[in-house]
Amino acid sequence: MITRLKIKGFKNLVDVDVRFGPFTCIAGPNAAGKSNLFDAIRFLSASASKTLIEAAMLVRNETARTWDVRSLFHRVGNEISEQMSFEVEMIVPQSAVDDLGQAAKATANFLRYALVLRSRDQYPAENGFVGPLEILKEELVHIHLKEARKNILFEHSSKWQGSALHVIRRAAPFISTTGEGSARVINLHQDGGGRGRAQSNPAQQPRTILSVANAAESPTVLCARREMESWQLLQLEPSALREPDNVNAPYHLDSNGRHLPATLYHLAYASNNGNSNSAADPDRLYCQVANRLSELIDDVGSVRVDRDEKREILTLEVAGRDGTSYPARSLSDGTLRFLALTVMELDPAARGVICLEEPENGIHPERIPAMLELLQDIAVDPTDPIDESNPLRQVIINTHSPSVVLEVPDDTLLVAGIKEDLHEGRSLRKALFGHLPDTWRVKSGDPQHIVAKGKLISYLNPVPPRDSVAEPFLPRAGAKALAESPARRKRVADRDDLQPWLPFPRIDE
């Protein structure tokens, strides 16, 4: 789970400092930096398991047809920044397994990881340099438990903090960089405090020290590596969601949605209502999925996975109330994406950071609240302890939609924009991420990041009211009674300071 991310020199993220909660919605116009923020998370995730050049190649390149690693660096005219840096504060799993199957337990799981890279125009093979990216600094340190309240700003209970954080007092870092130039050394320290392994020439190493950590050398670094590897950009493709699965297929969703039938089938037959002594109850889980799907479409009778024993094929099927069954290939794109997210919400093994672009695509405006409710339910609930029913998951979405902005809780909203600035006498455009007043992000103490009401006007255009389905019942129930029904989450649309701007004001009397 990412609690804070600082980025300098990556695309148009010149000097970004963003704090995240369990669920975050980033809204803003095109080219404001929303997707670039996702790209930065994706790059950091890939750098935890791949070489730096492989991680860079996974990031989208909008500047040229021919890929160039320099496209990742901030550019002003023809001038390209020489360095880019990342600093992330994160809560990592307390245990992990390395590539050889060895188990590891972290001595601290609230960590700060820093990575500084430099672009090099020349990297001759005879000198042993293996790529155009050079590591200037790599560091991993723990954040003391006493600092947790200052660093984790979103509202959370002491029960949640007690289950989420595990920190043993430690003075030494887990990864450190010392020296300059040719004398620069990156050290991997052992959890017991020993020096461990040193990489004497970081300029020649093709990957980070974190990406090669194992259980024997540094269990905590391995846990940090596994956490970063779990960060994913969901790009749910209808073609992948429609595919049937072999009975032996992996039973965890890919980032594109592949293996949806196998994942649902495995969850159904592993479900025993929390009682390890009872038999699996697939009908119970199928019923849960159908009930959630009925929030998106009205005609849902059942959801199940058909197992063809002869062909050894698993096929996802949705039946209407009249009993007519429809295979996945017949379902709409929006329905399939909603189903995939529903299955992810029920899968306790689905953990880490989930980034999703424009979740409203393919969803009718009246059903957008159902999609947002689902996404918020996927994220960890910071009022309850972390366990199998409340895994440590984080959801970050971006959007252009006014309907989404008005419906999300006001303390989850970040507004992306572009700020004109001067650097060495030259004008530059940089991304800025602001938050609403009177929300937990105000605790960061940076008044420049508070978004004025006027900046939200573009999102206050006429949209279908959330409670339009209740309009026929107004005369019978009374408008005031409906208005006083407490919402589970306070939305942007519920803020008192925004009521004059809304096309459908809140009913107070």
Image (spheres, rainbow, N blue to C red):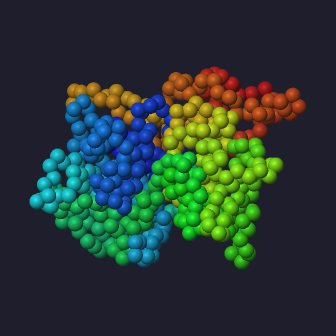
Frontmost residue, 31 versus 327: 327
* Residue shown at the point (74%, 40%) measured from the top left: 486
User: Where is residue 68, by image quadrant?
Assistant: top left
Q: From the viewer's perspective, tell me whether residue 355 is left or right of residue 378.
A: left
Frontmost residue, 78 versus 114: 78
Position of residue 58 measured from the top left corner of the image (x, y, whole percent): 36, 50
User: Where is residue 303, by image quadrant?
Assistant: bottom right
Position of residue 233 measured from the top left corner of the image (x, y, whole percent): 47, 50
Position of residue 464 measured from the top left corner of the image (x, y, whole percent): 68, 29
Residue furthest left as drawn: 126
* Residue shown at the point (68%, 38%) measured from the top left: 367
* Residue shown at the point (46%, 45%) measured from the top left: 19
Q: Is residue 437 above or below residue 160?
A: above
Frontmost residue, 271 versus 192: 271
Q: Quadrant of the C terminus?
A: top right
Q: From the viewer's perspective, tell me whether residue 320 is left or right of residue 211.
A: right
